[in-house]
Image (spheres, rainbow, N blue to C red):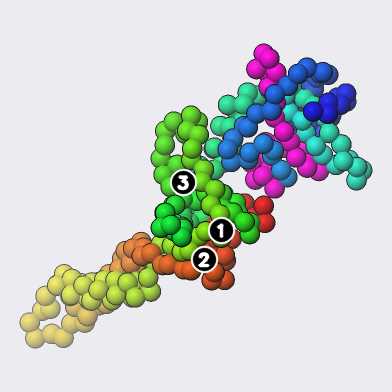
């Protein structure tokens, strides 16, 4: 490893401590999501180094005492520079930060879960972290429900795009939505009419009609909400242009990684 004499890097956040070091360091993988290096697209998503402007990439190392060293690569005046720091944060703290960002987006349903079926009829379901023309990096289904996710190492699948035959996504069905809305409206009409007060003898009363209309309106709204929650799987061939559009829309990181 090329180790440079470290200058005082004022653009780094206060959570990091700058150090001069010539020690023997061993590279580590902070998270299976980022692999050996944290690139600028991943950093813009995880925001691990908010104080570093013009960030390019970072690699992580441990010394014999298990201290965490980070080699940060960045641009300054259009020149690519790097610096070696020893971090006050442990590898586990950084990994927790990465997992927190992922879990937050998954739980908020910022992207939809997808299922991929390979040419060998193997099925992989989960959230797309990133993808390019060669492969898809998939966070496996159920990751957000795992309590000990910090210790779980095998929640990432790397799928070769060329071996994927089908993709499935659960979507609301227009037919089910329409049917559910109609059923709700009709049911509401009869319930509303039944709840209307009896008119006085010999008098014409529109209150029953008003109750029926009100019940129908409320019933149609409830039917629409219920119908919208019913998801049915839609299947696409891997070669369809719509498939890549759906993957791109439901990827946590931009395509082309």
- Residue 218: horizontal and vertical position, in percent? 30, 69
Q: Is residue 109 left or right of residue 79?
A: left
The residue lying at 46 percent from left, 64 percent from top is 166
**Dot 1 crowding, Cα within 10 Å, few <14, some 14–19, many 20+:** some
State which tag comes first along the sequence, 1 or 2. Answer: 1
State which tag comes first along the sequence, 3 or 1. Answer: 3
Q: Nearer the viewer, mark 3 or mark 1?
A: 1
- Residue 253: horizontal and vertical position, in percent? 62, 51
The residue lying at 54 percent from left, 37 percent from top is 99
- Residue 242: horizontal and vertical position, in percent? 54, 70
The answer for how far apart the CA atoms under marks 2 and 3 are is 19 Å
Q: Name the residue carrying label 2.
A: 238
The answer for how far apart the CA atoms under marks 1 and 2 are is 8 Å
144 to 216, vertically: above or below: above
In this view, the residue in front, 215 or 226, is: 226
Q: Name the residue carrying label 3.
A: 140
Q: Quadrant of residue 135?
A: bottom right
Q: Is residue 77 visible?
A: yes
In this view, the residue in front, 99 or 223, is: 99
> Residue 161: which numbered mark, if any?
1
């Amino acid at each position: 490893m090329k180790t440079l004499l470290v200058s005082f890097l004022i653009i780094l956040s206060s959570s990091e401590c700058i150090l001069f070091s010539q020690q023997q360091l061993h590279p580590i993988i902070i998270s299976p999501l980022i692999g050996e290096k944290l690139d600028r697209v991943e950093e813009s998503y995880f925001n691990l180094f908010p104080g570093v402007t013009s960030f390019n990439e970072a690699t992580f190392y441990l010394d014999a005492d298990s201290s965490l060293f980070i080699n940060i690569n960045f641009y300054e005046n259009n020149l690519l520079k790097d610096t070696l720091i020893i971090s006050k944060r442990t590898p586990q703290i950084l990994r927790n930060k990465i997992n927190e960002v992922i879990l937050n987006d998954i739980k908020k349903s910022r992207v939809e879960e997808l299922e991929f079926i390979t040419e060998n009829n193997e099925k992989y379901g989960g959230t797309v972290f990133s993808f390019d023309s060669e492969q898809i990096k998939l966070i496996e289904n159920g990751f957000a429900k795992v309590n000990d996710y910090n210790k779980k190492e095998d929640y990432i699948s790397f799928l070769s795009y060329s071996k994927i035959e089908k993709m499935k996504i659960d979507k609301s069905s227009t037919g089910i939505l329409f049917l559910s809305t109609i059923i709700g409206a009709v049911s509401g009409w009869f319930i509303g009419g039944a709840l209307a007060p009896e008119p006085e003898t010999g008098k014409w009363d529109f209150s029953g009609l008003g109750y029926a209309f009100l019940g129908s309106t409320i019933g149609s709204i409830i039917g629409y909400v219920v119908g919208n929650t019913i998801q049915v799987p839609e299947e696409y061939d891997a070669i369809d242009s719509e498939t890549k559009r759906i993957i791109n829309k439901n990827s946590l990181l931009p395509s082309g990684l």
